[in-house]
């Protein structure tokens, strides 16, 4: 979950590293540091807190050099203080290292190294790696070989980057397992590396993603790729299409606000080129789906975490309704521990913005072990989830930087709808007319999203009312039950207000006891097949003195007489309604957090890519 940046070339490494770290701060923001080789010795600057603390430190104590590495941390072992911040230095001061991941056997390794006389200067698991490298370094064995020997001791998933003052012409980077992505960027006479693309996109779009157990030795002229056993490997350079400007805040105060407002474009791009409105055909070429396999599928299991899991719940309803194919949703962190029943006729479909979430990757591996076909809906290009899948749908939203997911929630809702239409078509469940009708509904989505966004000033007024509440219940039914979960998650992660999403029908089984004047109830009640049930729920809440904020369809006079406040949304086909009803809830959570003076893009304790279990 940490961010890593590296540079080697003719320019000063420090500003390049700091600007790369700025773009990766969403990955972790407990502490930050950098190391640069200056006049043949390694200079380290690091501090607790956000990146701006490191920037001030570097202003006070400047450091300059042609080679350097940097890190922004999400603490796993040891408090987020300066001594635990990366880079970590060995005993001799010749080698420093930054790391993303968890050394699962670090206690064992630390005891072993302590017996050899090594003294530790931090509470991190990472520090054992640099001492292991030093154990093998000698005049005969250089950094490259010492790193290879050392890294073979590690259990767990890692991205690791090392430099040595004795070999100031190279950076050694390695990836072990799923969760420690390393991308190497190729410039003209200079090279970059990072844990994630946005850090280097302003410099280059020509990249190589390291695979597990690969190590790269990077000089300013290029890269040698090898396995951790030292076998040389060929590499193929990919040119990525992401626009670096997409990773900028532009006129917006926060990335999250920008990303909410990008949803007209991201929903348009999600549909563009994938549907033929004339014929109703859906094209998802990277899914590699044959008619034969489509007809062979007996079950789909959708696995995901957090916001992505709520998209999965919507997907279950869509696939079951349109395709009539049994579909289960599993929280990825639970899936592998319950001995799931999947086989070669099952599709395990992962949904992940980052494509790096450790739990999701582990669930995919569990599916693979049992012979299932692996599909994914992923945003981060070249991510592990995308690469290990038999077929994938790319989200087409561009980078999502705000820690709270927004556009990477609405995009998969549309992807899942298109997937359902495609499967239904290939399995012969729908005819051409039905296919055209289903696909025609997609055309309206971007415009309806835009209409919701224009209502931000009205949503802001509701935010004013709710800004000081301590608790909030979100209720929904049917296809908008996941919208209630997502609305509540957005509020709690951004504003730290205790919020719960509930299936509205469950209220009478207990939670209704919570209803009173001080417990706002957000009822998602658009004109969909569950509308009347939601009206009853709103009435029951009002009868007990609760305050109701409804998400309702334009022109619904009944709701305006029942609810205290209304977040209006335009009329939409019910199957696509979650992509619309969630918009005011994203804005509501965003506005409340801003009013409470909170850090919207980097809420406390969170990180964008959760690469630990
Ligand atoms: O990258 P992923 O989509 O796999 O991430 C899954 C969750 O960690 C993520 O959705 C998380 O719940 C966000 N904080 C939600 O805003």
Image: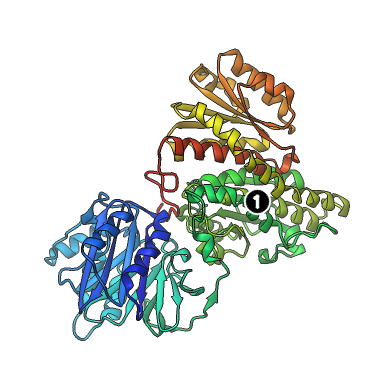
Q: Is the residue marked by circle 1 packed among few (<14), some (14-19), or many (20+) residues within 10 Å?
A: many
Using the rendered view, name the quadrant where residue 561 is placed.
top right
In the picture shown, does residue 5 fall above or below 325? Answer: below
- Give coordinates of residue 388: x percent, y percent: 55, 65
- Would the CB of label 1 be found within 8 Å of ligand 1? no
Q: What colour scheme does the image use? A: rainbow
The residue identified by callout 1 is 264
- Give coordinates of residue 352: x percent, y percent: 54, 54
- Which of the two residues, 65 or 304, is positioned nearer the viewer here? 65
Q: Can residue 165 be seen in this view?
A: yes
Q: Residue furthest front?
A: 251
Q: Quadrant of the N terminus?
A: bottom left
- Which of the two residues, 592 or 346, is positioned nearer the viewer here? 592
In the picture shown, does residue 63 fall above or below 360? Answer: below
Q: Residue at x 69, y 25 (%)?
A: 533
Q: Which residue is drawn at 75% across and 32% down?
A: 529
For this view, does 254 lie left or right of residue 56?
Answer: right
Label 1, secondary structure: give it.
helix
Q: Is residue 341 visible?
A: no
For this view, does 295 lie left or right of residue 504?
Answer: right
- Give coordinates of residue 66: x percent, y percent: 30, 78
Using the rendered view, name the quadrant where residue 456 is placed.
top right
For this view, does 164 lie left or right of residue 24?
Answer: left
Q: Which residue is drawn at 56% across and 25% down?
A: 521
For this view, does 429 lie left or right of residue 545?
Answer: right
């Amino acid at each position: 979950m940490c961010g890593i940046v590296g540079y080697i070339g003719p320019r000063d490494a420090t500003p390049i590293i700091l600007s790369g770290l700025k773009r990766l701060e969403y990955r972790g923001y407990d502490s930050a540091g950098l190391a640069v080789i200056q006049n043949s010795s390694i200079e380290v600057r690091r501090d607790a807190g956000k990146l701006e603390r490191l920037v001030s430190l570097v202003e006070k104590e400047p450091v300059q050099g042609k080679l350097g590495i940097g890190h922004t941390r999400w603490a796993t072992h040891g408090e987020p203080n300066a001594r635990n911040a990366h880079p970590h230095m060995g005993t001799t001061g010749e080698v420093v290292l930054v790391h993303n991941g968890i050394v699962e056997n670090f206690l064992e390794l630390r005891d072993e190294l302590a017996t050899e006389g090594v003294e530790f200067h931090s509470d991190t698991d990472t520090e054992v790696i640099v001492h292991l490298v030093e154990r093998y370094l000698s005049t005969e064995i250089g950094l490259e070989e010492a790193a290879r020997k050392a890294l073979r001791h590690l259990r767990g998933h890692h991205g690791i980057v090392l430099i040595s003052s004795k070999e100031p012409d190279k950076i050694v980077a390695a990836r072990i397992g799923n969760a420690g992505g390393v991308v190497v960027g190729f410039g003209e006479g200079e090279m970059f590396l990072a844990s994630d693309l946005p850090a280097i996109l302003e410099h280059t779009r020509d990249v190589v993603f390291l695979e597990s157990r690969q190590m790269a030795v990077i000089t300013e002229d290029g890269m040698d790729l090898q396995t951790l056993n030292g076998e040389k490997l060929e590499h193929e350079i990919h040119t990525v299409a992401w626009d670096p400007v997409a990773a900028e805040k532009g006129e917006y105060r926060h990335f999250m606000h920008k990303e909410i407002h990008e949803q007209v474009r991201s929903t348009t791009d999600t549909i563009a080129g994938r549907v033929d409105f004339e014929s109703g055909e859906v094209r998802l070429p990277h899914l590699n789906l044959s008619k034969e396999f489509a007809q062979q599928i007996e079950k789909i299991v959708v696995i995901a975490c957090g916001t992505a899991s709520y998209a999965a719940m919507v997907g279950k309803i869509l696939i079951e309704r349109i395709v009539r194919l049994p579909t289960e949703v599993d929280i990825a962190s639970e899936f592998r521990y319950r001995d799931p029943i999947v086989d070669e006729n099952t599709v395990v479909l992962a949904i992940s913005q980052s494509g790096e979430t450790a739990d999701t990757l582990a669930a995919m591996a569990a599916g693979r072990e049992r012979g299932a076909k692996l599909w994914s809906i992923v945003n981060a290009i070249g991510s592990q989830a995308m690469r290990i899948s038999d077929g994938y749908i790319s989200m087409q939203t561009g980078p999502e930087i705000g820690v709270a997911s927004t556009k990477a929630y609405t995009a998969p809702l549309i992807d899942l709808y298109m997937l359902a239409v495609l499967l239904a078509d290939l399995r012969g469940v729908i005819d051409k007319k039905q296919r055209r009708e289903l696909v025609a509904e997609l055309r309206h989505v971007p415009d309806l999203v835009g209409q919701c966004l224009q209502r931000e000033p009205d949503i802001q007024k509701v935010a004013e009312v709710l800004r000081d509440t301590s608790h909030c219940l979100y209720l929904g039914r049917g296809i908008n039950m996941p919208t209630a979960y997502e609305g509540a998650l957005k509020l709690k992660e951004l504003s730290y207000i205790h919020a719960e999403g509930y299936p509205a029908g469950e209220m009478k089984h207990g939670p209704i006891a919570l209803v009173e004047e001080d417990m706002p109830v957000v009822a998602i009640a658009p004109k969909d097949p569950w509308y009347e049930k939601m009206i009853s729920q709103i009435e029951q809440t009002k009868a007990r003195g609760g305050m109701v904020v409804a998400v309702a369809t334009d022109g619904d006079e009944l709701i305006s007489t029942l609810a205290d406040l209304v977040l209006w949304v335009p009329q939409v086909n019910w199957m696509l309604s979650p992509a619309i009803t969630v918009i005011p809830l994203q804005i509501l959570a965003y506005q409340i957090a801003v009013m409470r003076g909170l850090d919207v893009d980097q809420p406390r304790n969170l990180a964008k890519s959760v690469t630990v279990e």
